[in-house]
Image (tube, rainbow, N blue to C red):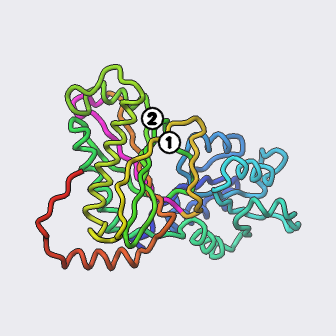
Amino acid sequence: MPDPTRLEAKVLLLEHDAVQYEALMAFCAEAGLVALPRGAANALATLAEHEDLAGVLLAEDLPGCEPDALGLARSLHRLRPELPTFFRRSSSSPLQPEQAAVLRHVWSVGDLDGLRSAVERAIFSLRYPSELVKGIIELTTQSLNSMFPYAEVSAELPYVVHDRIIYGEVSTLIPIESTWCRGYMMLQTEENSLRQGLIQGLSHAGIGGDLGFRELNNLLGETTNLIWGAFKNRYIPPHAFANAQIQVPLVINHQHKYMSFGSQDPQLCIRYTLSDPQRPGTPHLLIVQRFIFNLLWSPEGFAEFSAQAQQATPTGELELF
């Protein structure tokens, strides 16, 4: 039976051998990996195109590498050291320590079981309960519909990422803390797409026109706060922490588009597309949501909280945000 807590993850597939390519494509489908097949010539360019990768599958005898595949592995590691590289050996020569340092797992033809174990440890080290993921998509979609009432909101299939590259130029960050998790939620989008969406009238009447970046930041911040409030009402016990403090979204807008949370654990990522149902041909607005539970993550604690919440009776109290 498929594991409902294991989400998909995107990996860069650098394999030229026809037999191994077919075997790895089947392996990826079985392991929950979405493979992006590329050649050596455009491997580095693919990193610039995708900010949501979880790993790299690289063949030692891949043609077109300068000076060789290990050199390409070093280049990939230098650009995105958080991405684990799974290196298929085609020779028996020993690896130098500096070469092995940029590889997460080395395997040979026929050892797919070893590769599967390595993928489980490196990419799927955290599992997300399907009930939680479904609830997050539901409350986020409702919040986006409230902030952008004239947009049609759709969510893509959720997946896990190891990349630390921020999508777009505008991001918000807000802490999340409960008895079963501690970390952050992020929203990310492109500034021009957000401005264009407001000009098209996706949000409330009167919001649009020539908005400055501060107004756009504030709008995304309000959206983040609305989602956080819904998350708090549904998943955080009222008296979980005695010294609970008010949390305010942090807005990030910088050139390097990189943020580290001091953890190598995979992050939960969901992409939401906001489109104009009245004008199907107009550009859509993409908002990327990430959950980073870098301080505490206990799926067992979530299951226990969820069971208790189903048995609790309404208190009649109303919380405002």
Question: Quadrant location of residue 40?
Answer: top right
Nearer to us in this view, 305 or 283: 305
Nearer to us in this view, 29 or 218: 218
Rendered-image quadrant of the N terminus: bottom left
Residue assigned mark 1: 167
Instruction: Residue at 31%, 68% (x, y): give it.
Output: 131
The answer to the question of whether label 2 and label 1 lie on touching residues, with beta carbons closer than 8 A, is yes
Residue assigned mark 2: 190
Vertical arrangement, residue 79 with respect to residue 57, above or below: above
Nearer to us in this view, 212 or 279: 212
Q: What element carries label 2?
A: loop
Q: Is mark 1 on a helix, strand or loop?
A: loop
Magenta residue span: 266-281
Q: Where is residue 60 in the image (x, y as percent from the top left)?
A: 77, 58
Disc ID at residue 182: none
Q: What residue type is labelled 1?
A: Tyr
Left or right: residue 12 compared with residue 202: right
Vertical arrangement, residue 59 with respect to residue 64, above or below: below
